[in-house]
Image (spheres, rainbow, N blue to C red):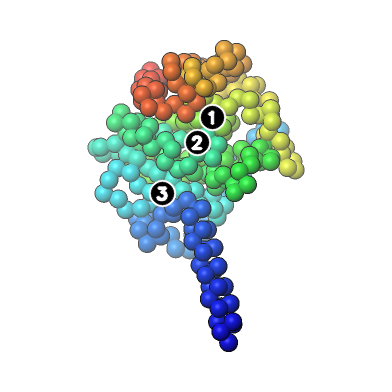
Amino acid sequence: MRKRSSRIKCLILIVVTACLLASCSKPQPVKPGKVMNENTDRQPIKTRLVKVEEFPPIEYSILMPAVSKSEGRTKEVIFYRDGGEIYARLTVPQGQGPFKTIIITSGLYAPLGRYSDKAEHYSEHGFAVIEFLCQNGTRPESGEDPAFLGNFVVDQIKDLYAVIDSCEYLPEVDTSNIYLYGHSMGGIVVCYAGTYRQDEIKGLILVDPSFYAPEIMWFEDEVLLDRDLYPILETCKIPVIIFTGTEGSFGEDPDFFKPALAAFPNVQFVVIEGATHTMDGVEGEHLVDLSVEAIESWG
């Protein structure tokens, strides 16, 4: 009897420990009881079909986002795409909106909040900022990079599309003035998404974008995107600014950005002295200031 009791206690301990470990590995969710716009049945409110020339259409559905109540200038948001949750933060400036808005797509496996310092700095310039964590944005326990980078990128494009579409439910966002910011691998996601939806986007901010990625962008089954990126960039008529640094970034290779600079019809190129690939600290603040100047020059 004692042995049986010990086994039961041991089993309970294992289950509790597993639950605690699982909860630590997940991003922190917005508490469902603290949302401004409850939608309890969570039925799809919009299905969108984006046709990519010569490739299968990118199809997805969205739900109304859930927004946390907050007295500060940053709110926790959950966007939805195809039933999955996209955790995000919305930072707004002081004053009355709607505001010009910058949507940040992160580098590979960067955690939510990685760009909060830049979001705060953009808000000081009068911009609202949405940072979001793609549904596949958390590094797997194996620590390995995506086996099929093409499918990985397409899923991130869909998540970005869902965030763009859901902005109409955020009164703080001026949907006629949306800019896309993409860092590293997120820069490639923004290149595709911003070009395909350039009628809805005012400009692109690309921060040390990983232009090598399409060359290794394999697909598990059918090919969903053109791996030859530069002819696609030639069709992007909206203004673009590319940032790189001189320390530990792609800017160390003087030829790395030449094909993209030749392809984009309307592009600025800025090299920040001393900036690394992550563009942190003073160099990151300088990046924000310069990108705001560029946006103002775009009109």
Mark 2 and mark 1 in contact? Answer it, CB < 8 Å: yes
Q: Which residue is mark 3?
A: 77
Few, some or many C-alpha atoms within 10 Å of disc 3 (few <14, some 14-19, many ≥20)?
Answer: many
Residue type at mark 3 is Val
252 shown above or below 188: above
Q: Is residue 206 visible?
A: no
Q: Mark 3 or mark 2, which is nearer to you?
A: 2
Helix, strand, or loop for circle 3?
strand
Q: Residues within 10 Å of mark 2 (few under 14, many from 20)?
A: many
Q: Which residue is mark 1?
A: 184
Point out the tag, 2 or 1, that comes first from the N-terminus.
Answer: 2
Residue at 46%, 35% (x, y): give it: 104
Q: In the rendered view, would you say 272 is above or below 90?
A: above
Q: Nearer the viewer, residue 164 or 23?
A: 23
Q: Quadrant of residue 299 in the image? A: top left
Q: Amino acid at mark 1?
A: Ser
**Label 1: how many residues lie within 10 Å, few (<14), some (14-19) or many (20+)?**
many
Direction from residue 82 to residue 165 in the image, left or right: left
The residue pinned by badge 2 equals 106
Q: Position of residue 245 (x, y in %)?
A: 48, 19
SS type, badge 1? loop
Disc ID at residue 298:
none
Q: How far separated are the C-alphas under marks 3 and 2?
A: 16 Å
Q: Measuring 52% from the left and 22% from the top, which residue is drawn there?
A: 248
